[in-house]
Image (tube, rainbow, N blue to C red):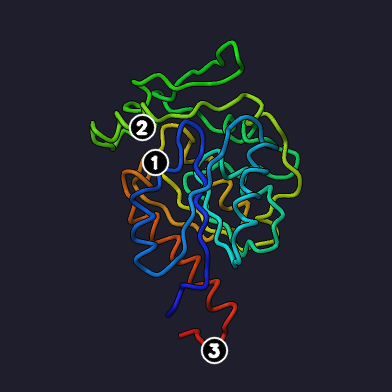
Amino acid sequence: MSTNRVDVVLVHGAWADGSSWRKVIGPLKADGINVVAAPLPLTSLTDDVAALDRVLERLDGPVVLVGHAYAGAVIAATRDPKVASLVYVAALAPDEGESAGDVFHRGQPHPKSPKLAPDPHGMVWLPDEVFANAFAQHASSEELAILAAAQRPIAVACIGAPIERPLWKDRPSWFLIAEDDRMIAPETQHFTAERMGARACTRPVDHTPQVTAPQDVVNIVLDAVRDVVTTAHPARRS
């Protein structure tokens, strides 16, 4: 089944950048899919949605929009009509009137979940040891060093802003639940995936499966892409 008419946009969360998707981009491109990793400034939810919309403007679509962690709030806030479906990867999925922070604080934190505070500029950074203890505990030492060095801080304003009607109420959604997540409680992920009516799969992965278990991410994205193709061309259903 040809998937080269579908665009995939990968959206990073807090303390990451587009390079965090590098192990996912190659396999998707090998399947003939156009892939873009959208850069977010992580300065406010409004700024981040605007940055995503600028990326979407450049594409013809249809688009499968993939969000990791905080980016779950961002992908649900766009209104670009080319978005055909949403994929949540260990992500936060606020409902209307909720913020990413509301969802993040819903579950019981893991004992190794970090206690974080903003710097004088209102930006939150991760200490290096948090990458190994909670953010990506399944990663290699080399991967951890790169994640820590390339981290992008997130503004408190990003996670405190409530969203309007989330796009997942109007589009099909998928959810990769990370059972070994020490940042976003797995119970929270199960709750939000069920609330969304998402097609969920559970894997024994940490908070950053795009780095530590990329094939799991590729598989769920391909499921979403194939669904877009068969929905657009019903005769292609097997």
Q: Earlier in the sequence, mark 2 or mark 3?
A: 2
- Examine the rendered structure and indicate whether residue 226 appears above or below residue 190: below
Please rate how many residues cluster around mark 2, counting C-alpha atoms within 10 Å: few if below 14, some from 14 to 19, many from 20.
Answer: many
Q: Quadrant of the N terminus?
A: bottom left
Q: Secondary structure at mark 1?
A: loop
* Residue 68: x %, y % from top left: 50, 44
| Residue 73 percent coordinates (x, y) | 62, 43
Q: Secondary structure at mark 2?
A: helix
At 38% from the left and 47% from the top, the residue drawn is 210
Q: How many marks?
A: 3
| In this view, 93 is above or below 221 | above
Mark 3 crowd level (few <14, some 14–19, many ≥20, 10 Å Cα): few
Q: Please name the residue shown 45% across and 43% down the image.
A: 18
User: In the image, what residue type sits under mark 2?
Assistant: Leu
Q: Earlier in the sequence, mark 2 or mark 1?
A: 2
Residue 235 image-quadrant placement:
bottom right
Identity of the residue furthest to the bottom in this view: 235
**Residue 208 badge:** 1
Mark 3 — residue?
A: 235
Q: Nearer the viewer, mark 2 or mark 1?
A: 2
Instruction: Say whether residue 102 is left or right of residue 218.
Output: right
State the residue position of label 2. 147
Q: Residue at 24% of width from left, 36% of height from top? A: 140
Q: Amino acid at mark 3?
A: Ala
Q: Position of residue 174 (x, y in %)?
A: 52, 58
**Eyeballing the image, is 171 above or below 114?**
below
Q: Do the CB atoms of the residues marked 2 and 1 lie less than 8 Å apart? A: yes
- Mark-to-mark CA distance, 2 and 1: 10 Å
Is there a contact, CB below 8 Å, between mark 3 and mark 1? no
The reply, left or right, for residue 212 in relation to residue 235 is left
Neighbours of disc 1 within 10 Å: few (<14), some (14-19), many (20+): many
